[in-house]
Image (cartoon, rainbow, N blue to C red):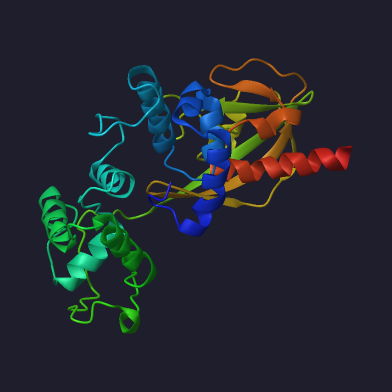
Amino acid sequence: MLQQTQVAVVIPYFEQWMRQFPTITALADAPLSDVIKCWEGLGYYSRARNLHEGAKFLAAHHDGQLPNPLPKLKGLGPYTQGAIRSLAFGEKAPAVDGNVMRVITRYFNLPDDIGKVSTRRKIESLVAEFLPDERPWEVMEGLIELGATVCKKMPDCASCPLTDCSRSTHLPFNSRKTAITQLCRFVAIIESKGHVLLRCGKPGEVMADLYEFPYFDTFTEILTLDLPLTLVGTLSKATHTFTRYRATLFPSQFTAPEPKEIEGYLWHPIASLHNLPFSSGHRKLCKFVKDAREVEE
């Protein structure tokens, strides 16, 4: 959960997750839709799907326990493996995340491109040199916390315990840093007889297993839907950031006389929209539907 996400955001999600899935077996037995719903709003939903798949594998092959040495599980990369080995099993193992990369590249004035595997391995080797034989997990956690709280993008060098650090604040260098692409999407919130029109992301799509309202690149494309639509009004825009995109959503409300079947879409009762996992941008739009329904009632 902490990958690409701030601690303050993660805490309530983590607490809810542990209440809902207190054991590996509980997670394995849960429907994927419940797992995605619990993850709703954190983004990078492949992490939730990988956790679910991993739990099912451990339930089937390891009696619902995480063995040591670790098995090969989808999504269990070098950092996660290192963190589990260090913090769960107490091993002398480097766990190199973005926080640790900042500390190490600045401390050693290391200009190497952290987007390369060779650089990550070099940093892992340097971290391993830091770790003592006794209670190595404490130093490993200390390096992670140092990067998270002191050696941030704008570091507080005066508070840093590493007094002989090179203080190369322009580091780390990452040639693979991805620019954000701006998107504009015109969203159609279409109601008919207590139902609303939705689509569910297909496997392999960025929003796989998540629900969204129909959206198009232009407003006029909404009219290509095979439905007789009546425009009720336009709503306030919303923003939605995912992977390397930032989408601005321009929603409009419509009504249709009948919930006619449309390929690729489904009609869902408005009263139970809250049970579905939505992408974060479209979850904001659900509030418009809820508010409008309360006004009508």
Residue 157 in picture, x, y percent from top left: 30, 81
Is residue 162 in view?
yes
Residue at image position (26%, 40%) is: 77
Residue 7 in picture, x, y percent from top left: 47, 57
Residue 37 in picture, x, y percent from top left: 56, 34
Q: Is residue 261 above or below residue 275?
A: above
- Whether residue 98 sits left or right of residue 246 in the image: it is left
Along the viewing direction, whichever of 173 and 24 lies nearer the viewer: 24
How many numbered marks does the figure carry? 0
Q: Is residue 140 above or below residue 267?
A: below
Along the viewing direction, whichever of 27 and 3 lies nearer the viewer: 27
Residue at image position (32%, 59%) is: 141
Quarter holding residue 140: bottom left
Along the viewing direction, whichever of 122 and 257 lies nearer the viewer: 122
Is residue 210 in view?
no
Residue 209 in picture, x, y percent from top left: 49, 28
Residue furthest out toward the bottom? 158
